[in-house]
Image: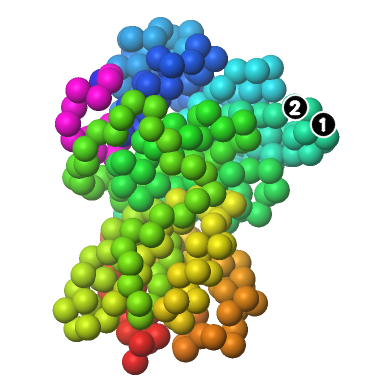
Amino acid sequence: MGGTAQKNINFVKAVNLAMHDALAADPSVFLMGEDIADPEDGGVWKATAGLSTKFGTERVRSTPIAEEGFVAAGVGAAQAGLRPVVEVMLMGFITLALDPIHNTAAKWRYMTAGQSCVPITIRTLGGAGSGVGAQHCDQLEGWFAASPGLKVVQPSNPAEAYGLLTASIFDDDPVVFIEQSSLTGRGVRMPAPEPGSRFPLGKANVSRTGTDVSVIGYGAQIADALGVAEKLAEEGVSVEVVDLRTIAPFDAPAVLTSVAKTKRAVIVHEARTNFGPSAEIAAQIYHELYGELAAPVERVGAPFTPVPASPPLESGFMVGPAEIEAAIRRTVR
């Protein structure tokens, strides 16, 4: 896959296209990760399919199953001036690479007084819904958002995936780029963006304007929120949907502007509610707008338990339109 000849692309192909265009634009960009080259079928999710054939295995490198080792190698390459895009196959496996991510990549700019940076992008897949058990499905964005120096990005659709991944690759700070499994499996297709299109990191997008309640989130839950907003509009409830795009740093001014207008907020993500990103967002809303709120801030997320492998239990664990709708109704009743 290459260029923008395809008129419509799904989420996985958007990720593929962003990496293709980055590789073509800048010789310092290279990819590495488990089984990502074409002799190994272009990765488990096929997000890198075709890229090693076009750009060679020097720039699209399959690695051993050794997350700490190859992520650390990527960090070193970034310190030396390259722009590695490192794939950690599943977010549950990223725990093995926390030392190079948190202790080196995130802190390097601080430790060098801003004289050196680590322009690495770490791609990983998180989220429940595939029935593969607790060690393969985590949404750990809150961990990385709590690490000063890291940027944490989670796109909500194919177009966002292209623009945000391109921006991440060419950002001079380390980025954890999270692809949600429920999005990679959806058949949503969108027009391919212009080559090199970038969405600025740290800037939210108001996906739908409204006046009665603000729904704030990221990832797959944005499409769910938009569907709920469409349904509730028939009842006269006007829902504004704010797609954060970037979890760290999150766009506090955009969130506060929206909630100041609607006086109500629902924060939603697939990650666990306990100690999740919604806690920090809610805290800032309360701090800045406490006297203006017409209802308590609602938080929608997963329960505080590992992801179940049993399909019925996993279904109950996951956040969906029903939970978002119920939370909105609680704020406007």
Q: Where is residue 300 in the image (x, y as percent from the top left)?
A: 43, 72
* Residues rendered magenta in the picture: 2-13
Q: Which color mode does the image show? A: rainbow
Q: How crowded is mark 2: few (under 14 residues within 10 Å), some or many (20 or more)?
A: some
Q: Name the residue under label 2.
A: 116
Q: Where is residue 252 in the image (x, y as percent from the top left)?
A: 57, 62
Residue at 31% across, 63% down: 208
User: Can you see residue 44?
Assistant: no
> Outermost residue toward the bottom?
333
User: Can you see residue 2?
Assistant: yes
Image quadrant for the C terminus? bottom left
The amino acid on which the numbered mark 1 sits, given as a three-letter code, is: Thr
Q: Where is residue 22 in the image (x, y as percent from the top left)?
A: 43, 22
Q: Nearer the viewer, residue 151 or 242?
A: 242
The amino acid on which the numbered mark 2 sits, given as a three-letter code, is: Ser
Label 2 SS: loop
Report if the CB atoms under discs 1 and 2 are less than 8 Å apart. Answer: yes
Q: Name the residue under label 1.
A: 112
Tell me how many marks there are. Answer: 2
Q: In this view, does 283 lie to the left or right of 309?
A: right
Relative to 117, does residue 302 appear above or below in the rendering? below
Q: Nearer the viewer, residue 169 or 66?
A: 169
Image quadrant for the N terminus? top left
